[in-house]
Amino acid sequence: MQQAFETMSPSERIRYVQELWDRIAETPGNVPVSDAMKAELDGRLAEHRDSPDDVLDWATVRARVRS
């Protein structure tokens, strides 16, 4: 019998959620995408196409997040 989520330890909860996400990701076509999400993604793609060199490397992003 599966243990109730509320009684799981934090590590068990993380493992459970990861397994759940992996199952969802197996069929990405079944994941609904709202019109707002589509518009956001289209906007980001358009920005990238307009300025493909306007990017930050991972070290810079990480440093900004940590500061």
Image: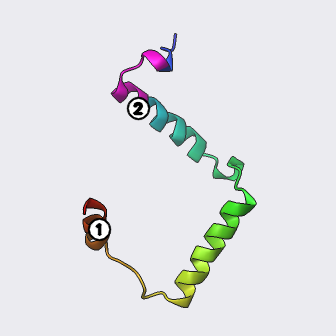
Dominant secondary structure (helix, strand or loop) of the stretch shown in magenta: helix
Rendered position, 64 above or below 47: above
Residue 8: image location, x then y, percent: 41, 19
Above or below, 61 against 56 in this view is: above
Q: Height in image: 7 above or below 51?
A: above
| Residue under the image location 63 percent in, 76 percent down | 43
Observer-nearest of 41 and 31: 41
Residue tagged 2: 15
For image coordinates 28% across by 64% down, the residue present is: 62
Q: Between 62 and 21, which is closer to the camera in this rendering?
A: 62
Q: Residue furthest right?
A: 35
**Mark 1 residue element:** helix
How many marks on residues? 2
Instruction: Locate residue 28 relative to residue 22 in the image: left or right.
Output: right
Q: Nearer the viewer, mark 1 or mark 2?
A: 1
- Residue position marked by numbered label 1 in the rendering: 64
Q: Position of residue 29 (x, y in %)?
A: 69, 52
Q: Which residues are magenta?
A: 6-13
Say how the picture is coloured. rainbow
Residue visible at 43% across and 85% down? 54
